[in-house]
Amino acid sequence: MQTSATFWDSLVFDGIDDVDVEAVTAAGQYAYLLYGGPPKKTTDPAKPSYLVTLDLNSSGKSVKEVFPTHAGDTTLPGREPHGIATYRSPSGPQLAFGFSSKYDSDDPVQFRSSLFYKSELTN
């Protein structure tokens, strides 16, 4: 995805040194981004992760909402955002997002995944 440095600079928040967009999805006039990063060690606290709503119809600033998500930040060691999708449900569209987590082991590729959802997509 190509965009200006100003756009990426506007997405940087406390606790995230570099923007690390892990996932993007769209529904209707909105695009949703999931970004954040893993802690340096699995025993370190989770880095902040954010859900960002972009209004694709906006001719000015497209960032509609920035939502810091704490889903799994105290229960998933090595928590790192890794996926996002919208899906239809009887109560309306919902946003699902996932994290990988690294548990201490001798196997360097042993990860687990966890899924969460947000039922309100916009304010």
Image (cartoon, grey):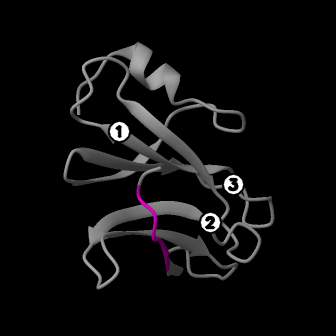
Residue depicted at x 57% and y 48%: 67
Q: Are marks 3 and 1 in contact (CB under 8 Å)?
A: no
Front label number (3 vs 1): 1
Q: Quadrant of residue 83?
A: bottom left
Q: In the rendered structure, does residue 116 fall within the stretch colored magenta?
A: yes
Q: Quadrant of residue 46?
A: bottom right
Q: How many marks?
A: 3
- Specify few, some or many for label 1: CA neighbours under 10 Å numbering under 14, 14-19, or 20 or more: many
Q: Are marks 2 and 1 in contact (CB under 8 Å)?
A: no
Q: Identify which residue, 99 or 97, lies in the foreground.
A: 97
Query: Which numbered dot is residue 105?
Result: none
Q: Amino acid at mark 3?
A: Pro
What is the magenta range?
A: 115-121
Q: Identify which residue, 19 or 66, lies in the foreground.
A: 66
With 18 as the anchor, is 30 left or right in this view? left
| Tag 3 residue | 39
Q: Quadrant of residue 106?
A: bottom right
Q: Amino acid at mark 1?
A: Leu
Q: Identify which residue, 17 or 116, lies in the foreground.
A: 116
First in sequence, mark 2 or 1: give its number: 1
Question: What is the spatial separation of the Cα atoms under label 3 and label 1, in whole angstroms?
Answer: 26 Å
Q: Quadrant of the N terminus?
A: top left
Front label number (2 vs 1): 1
Q: Amino acid at mark 2?
A: Arg
With 96 as the anchor, is 75 left or right in this view? right
From what the image shows, is residue 25 above or below residue 108? above
| Tag 2 residue | 79
Question: What is the spatial separation of the Cα atoms under label 2 and label 1, in whole angstroms?
Answer: 24 Å
Residue depicted at x 29% and y 82%: 89
Query: Which numbered dot is residue 54?
Result: 1
